Image: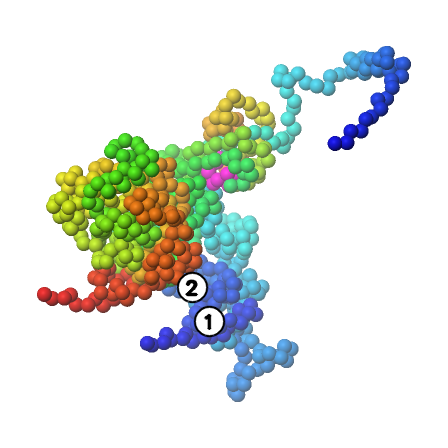
Amino acid sequence: MAVIPLERKTLSLAERTYVPQILSGLKTTFKRLLKPAETMEYPEQRPAIPPGYRGVPTLVRDPHGREKCVSCQLCEFVCPPKAIRITPGEVPEGSGREHVEKGPQAFDIDMLRCIYCGLCQEVCPEEAIFLQNQYSMTGYTREEMVNHKDRLYELGGTLPDAHFKWDKKKVAAEHGNAH
Amino acid sequence: MIAPTKPDLVTVNIDGKEIAVPKGTNVIEAARLVNVDVPHYCYHPKLTVVGNCRMCLIEMGLPAVDPATKAPVMDPATGKQKINWIPRPQIGCGTNVSPGLHVRTTSPMVKDAREGVMEFLLINHPLDCPICDQAGECKLQEQSTGYGRGYSRFVEQKNVKPKRTQLGPRVTLDDERCILCSRCIRFSKEVAKDDVLGFIDRGSYSTLTCYPGRQLENNYSLNTVDICPVGALTSTDFRFKMRVWFLKQTDSIDPESSTGANTVVWSREGVIYRITPRRNDAVNDTWMADSGRVLYKQVKADTRLTAIKVNGADSALDMAIHSAAELCKAGRVAIVGSGRSTVEEQFLTRKLAAALNAPVSLVSRVGQGDKLLISADRNPNVRGALVTGLIAALPAPRLAELGAAIDAGTVTTVVSLGEDLAAAGLTAAQLTKVSVVYLGTHANPTSAAAKIIVPTLTVFEKSGTFINQQFRIQKFLKAVPGPAGATDDLVVLAKLVTAAGTAIAASEVGPLWKLIAAEVPALGTMTFANLPDTGLLLDATPYAALPFAEGETLHYKPAARPAPATA
């Protein structure tokens, strides 16, 4: 192996005293002392989340408290890292929501796999899954990092609904064109 | 020998492509031959043509001839014979080809017609796709992307019809989704011969329903679900279980009778969700029996054997094989083969019998045939045992010979290949008199009495071949992996044969077929890989004299049986 010896540059007198370097550093320090802080004391202080931010995916309810997801499994299909796993189930008769027929029995999102791409939100035909402003996910075990259905609804809360599609369907079924 | 009659061929022109098709073919089938898709709902190749969905509208015309002289009228612009196009669209399913017929399937008029039909079909169709089980394999969904307008001009209220009607024990009906194609009605009437379905009411209020007091409960009811082009008829078993786009399709064979209906096993991540028929015009057309569709439940059954046992204690495979070989060497052995084993397993069973010099009996299962797709012989592969030489005569009922041999003390060890000897005719006392080596999938009285148990695989977890009642050899492929603890039947048999003194190198289907082809003359020209998907017909004449149990089924007529010899 070839070795190329390099000549070390000799330091000037000013450089050897270190004084100009210390002074120029102190200049920046004193300039910053008088200006407002650029950083934030996280976690006591938290940044404002801009609209459209893609945080942790969550499930939402409509203003009537209805579960919006019908477990069509399109998000599971589209999810690039296969983080979503849904077990579909039937809505039982007599629950008041049997006209929706289908709902998730289990809905798991593995946050160790999620890449926050937002395709699940984009593909959802029922507007049931949203990436909201929650950005901090931590845990001590792998199991803790899997958001189950209860946790997803807790994180998601309620969002306004422009359609109430299934309520309209129920009204139509009760007063519709039957003959 | 009479030469097969050649079908009269008719030359037609579809979208500018000339093709000769047999006389009597309709335009949809003719177009299929030149890879032109004519969308349709009500037309089904195995049912009568009714032409009520109007989706297959095409433009057609015939070469012009002068009415007086019958001379062809030439088009001066192209120099070819002029085509008289019919000014209105015609249905493709109800139009049979005629000589010189010209068809356009991509003209603006055809596109307009299809878009119009789609818009009317979608007027009362609910926007159910997210919860509809048909989504992903729905013809209406597919044609909507091609010919739908993407939004609805219909501002009135949609009709309300019953949802979640139980038509029978296995079929659920959502009437709102029904597009009134009447395929299910025609199937029940023409194929299942159980005319229970029909439309009531008129116009857009027409509703599919069962005849009062009747149910859609025949053993072929789930075929109506398969042929339903939309999600109106759904299988109660598969309802809301899994979306079809996740499921892997594996070609398989229905093992419940010697008909050997071709099937597709739909699985995801090692779990089977449903079984549907696969088209084979020589065996089962596009149908299969409901009873064959629930067989996947045996894969995850509670009684599934998953531990190798020797004298009741857990063991390893080589230990169990060693103990079994010791048992076989110590006493006189009899082998109970199975008509449910594959051809490959039966071949190895014959090798085992030869190595041990043991007599082989087969369990006979004879039930009632339904003249359609369930034959009287409920073993899928008795023919395989005959062809591989495992047995020379048809199995006798109730294992009478073996029972007598056990009573006489001339048999001390019985090797059972997945057969429940108690159910097959041996008494509990006879079972206790012998040492049983049981290679099987599920717990039963025989496995309880067995000295050595080696769990093996079900038909969905291995590849192999069956020979059906027509002597058609058909292959099936592994759909899901077997459970932990179960070993492939071929591996166990190959090890047993080797332990008995005859070395067998192959324990996989591919290499094993080289041995089979070398030793079984009837299968000499085949390999597993080159068996066609629709099976291969073997020569049945050497077995013509055997009194098989079957009566007539969909594509099988029993050969005229020679009169029984009188004493």
**In-front residue for pair B249/B432:** B432
The three-letter amino acid code for the residue at tag 1 is Val
The three-letter amino acid code for the residue at tag 2 is Gly
Q: Relative to residue A78, is residue B197 depicted above or below?
A: below
Q: Earlier in the sequence, mark 1 or mark 2?
A: 1
Q: Where are the magenta residues, as a range?
A: A67-76
Is B4 magenta? The answer is no
The lab-note entry on whether marks 1 and 2 share a chain reads yes
- Single out the residue that lies furthest toward the front: B501
> Which residue is denoted by mark 2 in the rendering?
B51
Q: Position of residue B245 (x, y in %)?
A: 47, 46
Q: Position of residue B235 (x, y in %)?
A: 36, 47
The answer to which image quadrant residue B422 occupies is: top left
Residue shown at 62% from the left, 15% from the top: A44
Is A75 magenta? The answer is yes
- Residue B209 marker: none
- Single out the residue that lies furthest toward the left: B567
